[in-house]
Image (cartoon, grey):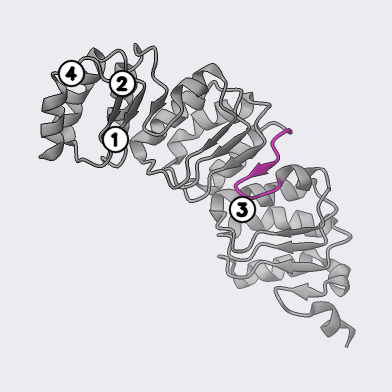
Amino acid sequence: AEGAIAISVLSHCTALVKLSLFGVGIGQQGMEDLIKVLKQNTSLQLIDLRNNGLQKEQAMDIMQAVEHLPNLEHLCGVPVDGLKKGTVKKVLLENLYIGEGESVIIMKLLRSNVSVTHLNLRGTHIIDDDLPDLLSFVGGNSNLKHLDLRDNDLSFQSGITLIESSLPSLEVISGVPVLAVRTNDIKALDLGGMDIGAFGSSIAVYMLQHNTSITSLKLASCNLGPWAVGDIVKFLQKSQVLTELDVRDNDFSLSDGFELLAALGDRRRQINSFCAIPLAGMLRN
């Protein structure tokens, strides 16, 4: 009710500069009336509609309604003007009440952006359907160094697709140091407890094919499953320096574990710790 009343009052305003309706409960009818308000206030610089359950379709309607606003700087916490002009280098939207609708606004604005170097979209309701916009951004922005997509509903397959489309200049994806792994500038890779999820772990496992320098690989509690066994096996078969491997608390079967162990071959004697088991010591005795 409060949201509807607020929109009713706003219908008489034509010179608004800042409009914040954060969490007022606008509702479906209120959102439709709000679009009319946005169209008649050409001086708006800030519009905040977060925490109102904004849906994707509504977000698209709002973006169309504000296209004519020449001075708009921020829309639902997103630096609209900076992204369009390429003046924003870091976009950090974690813990900023970015919902399903707001994520649409972010994705559409990022699609053609080439200026952002650091992008944190952790927990911003990004899903597999947003992948085309993500790929357009990641594949076309050579300035991008750090990308964080943890705590979103992205599958392991989306992770593989994204890393295959990313540029070699990208350094870190969701906590995974992809550049260091690719260039063999890392000896210990520990991703346990970093909440990388299946999306992030698929990127880590995929990148192992490029690495020959890692001596300690810890992927405990990384949402790994049978889909990851093949790539890990390939890494184990070619690695000559690995001495520690931890893949506990993942969705691996007993046969998966035997397959990983078999991939080490005679080099099992150099593995000091296999999932916390002192493998080398046991084999020597």
Kindly identify the residue that appears in the image at 22 percent across and 13 percent down. 40
Examine the image and state in which quarter residue 242 appears.
bottom right
Q: Which residue is mark 3?
A: 201
Q: CA distance from mark 1 to mark 3?
A: 29 Å
Q: Earlier in the sequence, mark 2 or mark 1?
A: 2
- Three-letter amino acid code of the residue under disc 4: Cys
Other-residue count near label 3 (Cα within 10 Å), few / some / many at <14 / 14–19 / ≥20: many
Rendering coords of residue 167 (x, y %): 69, 31
Q: Secondary structure at mark 1?
A: loop
Q: Which residue is mark 1?
A: 55
| Viewer-side label of 3, 4 | 4
Q: Is residue 237 above or below residue 38?
A: below
Q: Quadrant of the N terminus?
A: top left
- Three-letter amino acid code of the residue under disc 2: Val
Q: Earlier in the sequence, mark 1 or mark 4?
A: 4
Magenta segment main secondary structure: loop
Rendering coords of residue 98 (x, y %): 39, 41
Examine the image and state in which quarter residue 68 appears.
top left
Q: Earlier in the sequence, mark 1 or mark 3?
A: 1
Rendering coords of residue 31 (x, y %): 20, 29
Q: CA distance from mark 3 to mark 4?
A: 50 Å
Q: Quadrant of the C terminus?
A: bottom right
Kindly identify the residue that appears in the image at 72 percent across and 65 percent down. 260
Q: Which residue is mark 4?
A: 13
Q: Which residue is mark 2?
A: 17
